[in-house]
Amino acid sequence: MVPVKFFFSLLSIASVRMEMLCPAYCICEDRSAICDGSNKTAKFSYIPKFPSDITKVIFINNNISNLSRSTLKNLSPLKISHLDLKNNKIECIHKDTFADMKHLVKLDISGNDQVPIKNLQKCLHYLPRTLQELLLNHMLWHPLNNMNTMFDGLKKGQIKRIELSHSYLKPFSGKWFAGLNSLTYIDISWNSIEDKDLNFKGLNNLKWLSLIGNYLNYVPDFCTGDLYKLETLLLSNTRLANLINLQNNTRCLRQLTTLYLNGIAVPIIPNNAFSELKSLKVLEMTKMSTQLKKILPLAFNSSSLSSLSFSKSDRFIFCKTGVQKEYFKPKTLFKFCPGLTMLDLSHNFIEFTNQDIRDMFSPLINLKEIKLQYLDLVMMPRHFFHQFPRIQRIYLDHNIILPWSSNGEEIFNGLTNLTELHISSNRIGYFSSRSFPENILKTLKLIDLTGNQFSCTCKLTWFKHWMQNTKVKLLNETIYKCDDRTKLQDYNPTYIACSNIIFLITVSVGGGVCFLLAATILVYSCRWRIRFHIYKILSSSHYYQQIDGDDYRYSAYVIYCYEDFKWVKHELIPKMEENHGLHLCIPHRDFELGKVFADNIVEHMNISKTVITVLSNNFAKNEWCLFQLAVARSKLSKDGTFSIFPVMLEEIDFKNMNSSLYSLIKLSSYAAWNFDERGVELFWEQVINHVQ
């Protein structure tokens, strides 16, 4: 008998353990079971057994065409409070299907769009009185038949929330929910409802209403629908063409605290649009269409408003140009909502360098949170945040902010309550001891630096030491990266090692700078000798040889500066070439394009019989003129038949005279340009005789 009893006890334990096992392809944890057939080739065609402690079942994306009481038999012994049956291809629901679900609080049968309305209407009569939330989204009930008695089966219960989105429920009538006195939440978003299709009568207790995505061209008149208790209203992504009647059609919503107007295409935000909403706390106007061109001075006039989100309005610019074009008035934009504690202006363009734009924020002395994300900021705004003495959270993430080398006092001065600083995904490579003033480090509790590529050099010594000793929470600090992709936590510089490196770098850089400076001075002072030696090397490498007189291409090579080219062009060339048939080498005209200038000088001077220098004060100050003169003098010393003939356009000042010019003038005969008729004749006679 003992072995038999022992066998049955083991069998009993095994059966209990079997009961506690989660079904294959499902996940069971925290009293919840998830059976999602979306990623499986084999979908459930029945609802399996679950452990006895399960109270929430998410059974979605499977294949149960016929939902009945027997289908849920494995759930009836459990105290199921939440049942999700979305997208199970249900075609028929028996009226007593949920009769055994005595503890049900939330039921979701969305996405089963083959279920007939009458079919569903009957089963609502068998739902337990404990039910508070019913989700019937994506049911595609169109065309609608009589819906007036659709939800009568819920009258005996305490239903608080009904969702009917994406189901083509048009026209919509509040009479459908008559008798549901506990109903406070209705979602009828994305139902193609038009202005004429709305009737809110019968929803006197409603506190939350979503009309997102419907075809509404005007703000509905909520006052005729007696929605006096409404607290949250969602009108985002509708077809609102203007907000002109917003003030009048919402004047009765005295308890409205939250208003969503995201993604609408209005050209103007009018004056006092929200002034009649005396309890309004939260206003969201994000992703505004590019049609928004103007914000009138009293647009945000609201003494109760505490949170304003005006982000992702990409074409609306808060800058000098916007002020000049009267898109908005910075002095009044936030003047009439001084109670703001949260402001989100992310994904816009804000010109922080303009003082009028900075002053735009001055009325917001009660601000506790500001979001300036995705603004393409390169520098941290200086002398800006002091306008918000109560600020606690600053979001500057996802910009392109660089390290700020100046004193952090210019950025964080006057902030005594800052607890969170979010500057992730920027280009901040390092921090120094001056980056954050002492008062910030005392109050700061959290800082987010994720996504910055740190420069893991000795510049980071202070920051690494601070990381190891601070009580501030560094969000995701284990994944901080160096710019070489190594982990920041593995880089541990010491003050001693970095001090030695800094000393060596200082000495090396200092020595290098001194050497470079000395070399620069030496090269500059000897620049002509260096150029001349380069010329000699080039000359010898090209093996230039003396040529016979009959083989010269040019009668004379002319050295002149650019300022004197007008005289060369209008006086020298006509007289010498046109009147006397001589051929001059004029660098501006005869040099080969693309060739090194020094090579051009050497080659053309070697095929010229003589050199004419057009001397002037400009010539004396021109480095290339002096270089060409040095080349000519070198050729003169090697070739006895070569000659240099100076032409003096003007007297050269003593301050411009150098040794080479002085010796040329002293040791050579020259022709001086003269405006006297007899002097001009003598001048040309000297020049032509020399060249011929």
Image: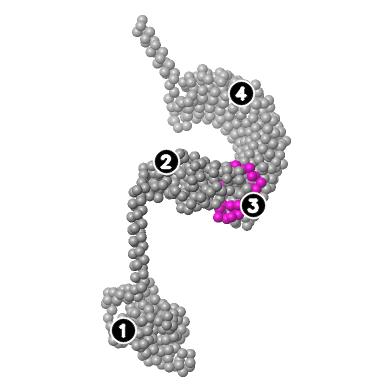
Q: Which residue is mark 3?
A: 331
Q: Which residue is mark 1?
A: 636
Residue under the image location 66 percent in, 28 percent down: 177
Q: Determine crowd level at label 4: few under 14, some 14-19, many 20+ residues with C-alpha closer than 10 A.
A: many
Residue under the image location 36 percent in, 7 percent down: 4
Q: Which residue is mark 2?
A: 469
Query: Whole-percent x and y of residue 311?
Result: 57, 46
Q: Nearer the observer, disc 2 or disc 1?
A: 2
Query: Whole-percent x and y of residue 17?
Result: 42, 18
Q: Nearer the observer, disc 1 or disc 4?
A: 1
Q: Is residue 141 above or below residue 647?
A: above
Q: Determine crowd level at label 3: few under 14, some 14-19, many 20+ residues with C-alpha closer than 10 A.
A: some
Magenta stretch holds residue 350: yes
Q: Is residue 585 visible?
A: no
Quadrant of residue 617 within the rendered picture: bottom left
The dominant secondary structure in magenta is loop
Numbered range of the magenta stretch = 332-359
- SS label for mark 2: helix
Distance CA(mark 1)–CA(mark 3)? 79 Å
Magenta stretch holds residue 432: no
Q: Is residue 489 above or below residue 79?
A: below
Q: Amino acid at mark 2?
A: Asn
Residue at the extreme bottom of the image, as rendered: 678
Task: Please tell me which of labels 3 and 4 falls first in the chain.
Answer: 4
Task: Please tell me which of labels 2 and 4 falls first in the chain.
Answer: 4
Q: Which residue is mark 4?
A: 124
Task: Please tell me which of labels 1 and 3 falls first in the chain.
Answer: 3
Q: Amino acid at mark 4?
A: Leu
Task: Please tell me which of labels 2 and 1 falls first in the chain.
Answer: 2
